[in-house]
Image (cartoon, grey):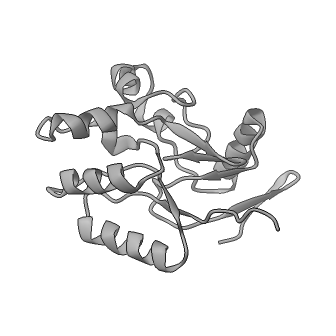
């Protein structure tokens, strides 16, 4: 009998909405997810601390988003330390987990603390590009090949879309 694969929930762009995060976690569990990866942008409201604490407890993997690079000093030090420790990317099987796109100019795996220090080296859209059309999807696929990976999961766009590359052609499939 083979080993059972774990089911992962991938969550992103909470923006401090605690009730939405709690609902997403409950739904994920009801659907059989036993592990959770967070793809960035925890911050955004006066519920940031509660969202971060829940993510600190529940996320097996987490990466930072653009919101995490604008840390609020009002957050407790342990929460700020967790946010600063988050990497720009994580690998799950043959998939890249990131906030915006594999084409981000942020170095793979750079920690938020270092990205905060280096943020003036690149523009916002170089650090957090959108995968918003066939050309951007093709560039993301090329970057994945360079990294030896087949798939990327990301948030940032606030739109659920899937792209599939067939040779030189890229098509939207979701």
* Figure check: 161 above or below 63: below
* Figure check: 12 above or below 30: above
* Figure check: 108 above or below 135: above
Q: The N terminus is located in which quarter?
A: bottom right
Identify the image quadrant of residue 120: top left
> How many circles with numbers are drawn on the protein?
0
Find residue 107 and report its horizontal and vertical position in percent. 55, 26
Find residue 61 and report its horizontal and vertical position in percent. 49, 47
Left or right? Give the position of 154 relative to 73.
right
Find residue 157 and report its horizontal and vertical position in percent. 47, 57
Kindly give the residue lying farthest to the right in the view shown.
167
Identify the image quadrant of residue 23: bottom left
Residue 71 appears in the figure? no
Kindly give the residue lying farthest to the left in the view shown.
74
Q: The C terminus is located in which quarter?
A: bottom right
Residue 161 appears in the figure? yes
Residue drawn at x 77%, y 37% is: 148
The residue closer to the viewer here, 77 or 165, is 77
Identify the image quadrant of residue 115: top left
Residue drawn at x 38%, y 25% is: 119
Left or right? Give the position of 7 relative to 12.
right
Residue drawn at x 39%, y 56% is: 58
Kindly give the residue lying farthest to the front in the view shown.
1
Find residue 49 and report its horizontal and vertical position in percent. 19, 51
Residue drawn at x 41%, y 49% is: 40
């Amino acid at each position: 009998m083979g080993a059972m694969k774990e089911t992962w929930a991938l969550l992103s762009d909470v923006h401090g909405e605690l009730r939405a995060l709690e609902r997403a976690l409950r739904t994920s569990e009801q659907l059989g997810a036993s592990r959770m990866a967070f793809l960035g942008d925890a911050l955004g409201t006066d519920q940031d601390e509660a969202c971060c604490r829940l993510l600190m407890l529940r996320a097996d993997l987490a990466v930072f988003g653009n919101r995490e690079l604008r840390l609020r000093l009002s957050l407790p030090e342990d929460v700020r330390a967790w946010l600063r420790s988050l990497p720009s990317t994580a690998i799950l099987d043959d998939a890249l987990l990131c906030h915006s796109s594999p084409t981000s100019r942020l170095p793979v795996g750079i920690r938020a603390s270092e990205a905060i220090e280096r943020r003036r080296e690149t523009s916002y859209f170089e650090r957090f590009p959108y995968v918003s059309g066939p050309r951007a999807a093709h560039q993301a696929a090329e970057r994945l090949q360079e990294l030896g990976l087949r798939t990327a999961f990301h948030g940032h766009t606030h739109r659920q879309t899937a792209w599939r590359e067939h040779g030189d052609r890229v098509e939207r499939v979701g």
